[in-house]
Amino acid sequence: MAKSDHAEFIAFSRRIMRALSKRLGDADPEDLAEMIELSRTLDSAIGAAVRGQRAAGFSWAEIAAPLGITRQAAQQRWGKLADTTPAAAQDDVR
């Protein structure tokens, strides 16, 4: 599988998250709550990406394969959201 054009951006995001986790090791517990909110934002962004892929015509099997899960598992996790929400109405992911 060829690396996508997004590989560098994803690697950068990973580095930021690792650095943040180190900084929060001795930070105020309130800051940990902000990191949990980032987790929710990431979940929302994943849902938006799945909606986009479904709108682009990708099958559940095509979406699931690189994730190492079955098409049924992918559809169970994101199906209701992806199939009922138009891709244009993606969540605000800031």
Image (cartoon, helix red, strand yellow):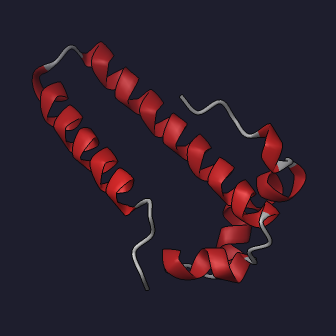
The image shows residue 5 at horizontal and vertical percentages of: 44, 64
Q: List x then y, in percent, for residue 72.
A: 71, 78
- What's the residue at 78%, 56% (across, down)? 82
In this image, 50 relative to 46: left or right?
Answer: right
- Where is residue 25 drawn, in percent x and y? 13, 29
Q: Quadrant of the N terminus?
A: bottom left
Q: Name the side, left or right, on which 41 lies relative to 63.
A: left
Where's residue 18, x and y in %?
A: 21, 43
Q: Nearer the viewer, residue 41 or 7?
A: 7
Position of residue 59 relative to residue 94, above or below, is below
Residue at horizontal 72 percent and vertical 66 percent from the top: 76
Residue under the image location 61 percent in, 76 percent down: 64
Does 65 appear above or below 6?
below
Direction from residue 64 to residue 24 in the image, left or right: left
Residue 74, quarter of picture: bottom right
Determine whether, in the image, residue 86 is placed left or right of residue 64.
Answer: right
Q: Which residue occupies 73% across, 69% down?
A: 75
Q: Residue furthest front?
A: 5
